[in-house]
Image: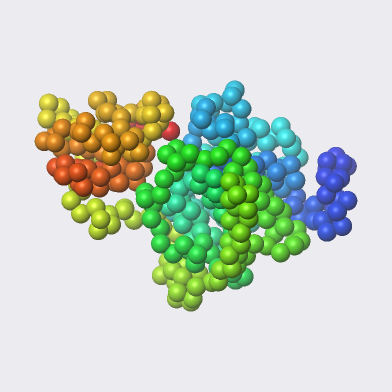
Amino acid sequence: MSLSKGERERYQRHLSLSEIGAAGQEKLKAARVLVVGAGGLGSPAALYLAAAGCGTLGLLDCDRVDLSNLQRQVLFDTAVVARPKAEAARERLMGLNPEIRIVAHALELKAANVREVFAQYDLVVDGTDRLSTRYLINDACVILRLPLVSAAIHRFEGQLMTYVPQQGPCYRCVFPQAADGMVANCAEAGVLGVLPGVLGTLQATEVIKLITGVGQPLTGRLLTYDALDMRFSEFRIQRRPDCAVCGDAPTISEPRDPPAQRPAATAGVRHLSASELHQLLSAAPADAPLLIDVREVREFSFGHLEGAINIPLGQLPQRLAEIPPDAPAVFMCRSGGRSLRACQLALEAHLPAPANLEGGLLAWATEVDPALRVL
Ligand SMILES: [Zn+2]
């Protein structure tokens, strides 16, 4: 993969670095990198990887651009609000570097498609904000022997680690247990806009190092960043021989979707699938249960079920009195995690038989009504 005259000019500052030079730049040109999540982390990662001349860059995201994304997702501008992120990102990156190939995957990553998508790449960048997807990506990378650069952000803090097959621990070695739904996502908790800029740029740095073979990758180390204290810390981590996916006797040999979360703490909560709720609402509209949507106001405004009332999860403890004590309520959110927590709060307040919409409004949009708009 030799460089054209235009490329030599474009990448001049890389060619001047003896550690990279033409050989390193040619490796970058030959590399195929997938960025999962074109959000706060994926934006700077993809921008810098495109600028650096990463020859094939995939962007996977099934969401659309929302005005509230622009505070940190620097791939997008006001003109592309409401457009699919993968497509809008592709156009932005093509404008930045027409020498490279950019592939938009406007889909949700699932166990059913992860092999097919990952097979097209040599390296994966995890920029997702959903914990269950993070485990799916990790497991797929371990099983398919793909390096993975993983980062996560929360409020003012971020963390970063790199997994290289056979060379160190995986994400599951560090965080063996998935606790999806118990962790607030960005919509709920808020995040300092510049924070993913720092972590996403570090991810791009790791990718460039892995491709060109310069420096020491962040394997066997978890890097944390605290923006308030302006402090980086590093924790040594080791591969766990009992890790479920990269351990000596792995129990996970195929990427899998997370099981429905029904921990013991939810005893007493009824679980309704989207189809079951639909039947319930259609069968006897007069006796329809109270629908309580615990997403943030902005998410609710974008689209919600007819008749649902909005009590964001953070306000629920103070607003439980608004729920009639004799009416069974169905709680819902985007994917079923926050609403499960809401059910637990309702149980603790002795409200009768709260129900959780399993899979949330995303499941409703898939199973019942594709016209429902879900942020
Ligand atoms: Zn592991």
Picture coordinates of residue 90, whole percent (x, y): 63, 36
Q: Is residue 21 left or right of residue 145?
A: right
Residue at position x 61%, y 27% from top? 77
| Residue sitting at the far front | 229
Which sits in the foreground, 355 or 122? 355
Residue 274 seen from this side: no
Residue 9 seen from this side: yes
What colour scheme governs how the chains and residues are painted in the rendered image of this protein? rainbow
Which sits in the foreground, 368 or 185? 185
Residue at position x 33%, y 38% from top? 313
Say above or below: 267 vs 187. Answer: below
Tell me how many marks there are: 0
Q: Is residue 360 left or right of residue 220?
A: left
Residue at position x 25%, y 45% from top? 345
Q: Quadrant of residue 9?
A: top right
Picture coordinates of residue 312, whole percent (x, y): 34, 34
Which sits in the foreground, 199 or 42? 199
Residue at position x 34%, y 56% from top? 259
Q: Quadrant of residue 292?
A: top left
Picture coordinates of residue 287, whole percent (x, y): 12, 30
Say above or below: 300 vs 44. Answer: above
Say above or below: 247 vs 104. Answer: below
Picture coordinates of residue 335, whole percent (x, y): 36, 42
Q: Quadrant of residue 12?
A: top right
Quadrant for the C terminus in the image: top left
